[in-house]
Image (cartoon, grey):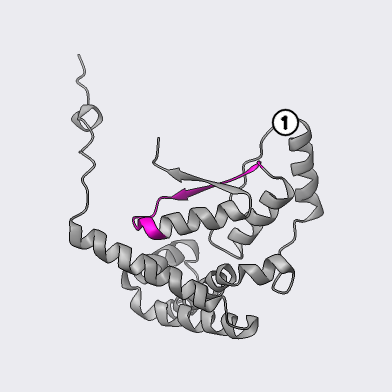
Amino acid sequence: MPTADPAMTAPAPPNRRAPWHKRLRRALVGHLVVALFRCFGLLPWNAAMRLGAWLGGVAFHFAGEDRRRGLEHLARAFPDLDERARVELLRRSFRHFGVTAMEVAQQHRIDRGTGARVDISPRLRAAIDGAVAQRRGIVGFTGHLGSWEQLARIIGRTYPGHAVAVAAEMRNPVLRDFAERYRASGEVRTLWRGRP
């Protein structure tokens, strides 16, 4: 008679609380990041976008683990690209991520129509309209490419009560709460992966 795999039957490890010094560091970092976002929101639009691109470029040099993982993924996705081209592609991705982060900081301008605008294509709008009319859902997938947060906000504000973002839960509770409040302000509910 086959026996059950011990890994499948073993109880889950207890959810341990991080040591106080890690919790304190996370809280301080989280509050600093939120304060910086608020300060970046005071900058003129073009200056904020340039600063975001620059900060993304700086982050590329300091994010060793993310850079290594990104290069591994690019090697799998684009085996014909040489190493130099993959490094440049990843560097540009980091810069773009910095710009996207600045768009979050500049959300008040986007909401007033004085910043960048993300529109829903007519084809997507028709699909969503049809699903809403039939009281059915649509599951959309997007990578961290382009303004995914802006797209969610446009859908959330166009179809209140119908937009849900599924995201990996952040370890930093201050940043997690900031992200959840930001999405909620655009009529987007956050469903954290791994939560019951």
Q: Is residue 91 magenta?
A: no
Circle 1: element type: loop
At which x and y percent is residue 44? 63, 83
Q: Is residue 20 above or below residue 190?
A: below
Name, please, the residue furthest toward the top: 1
Magenta extent: 161-174
At which x and y percent is residue 195? 40, 39
Image point (71%, 64%), residue name: 118
The crowding category of the residue bearing disc 1, from other C-alpha atoms within 10 Å (few below 14, some 14 to 19, many at least 20), is: few
Image point (25%, 59%), residue name: 23
At which x and y percent is residue 107? 62, 67
Residue 183 falls in which quadrant of the image? bottom right
Q: Amino acid at mark 1?
A: Arg
Please give the residue where the numbered disc 1 appears in the rendered image. Answer: 135
Q: Is residue 193 above or below residue 154?
A: above
Q: Please identify the quadrant where the N terminus is shown.
A: top left
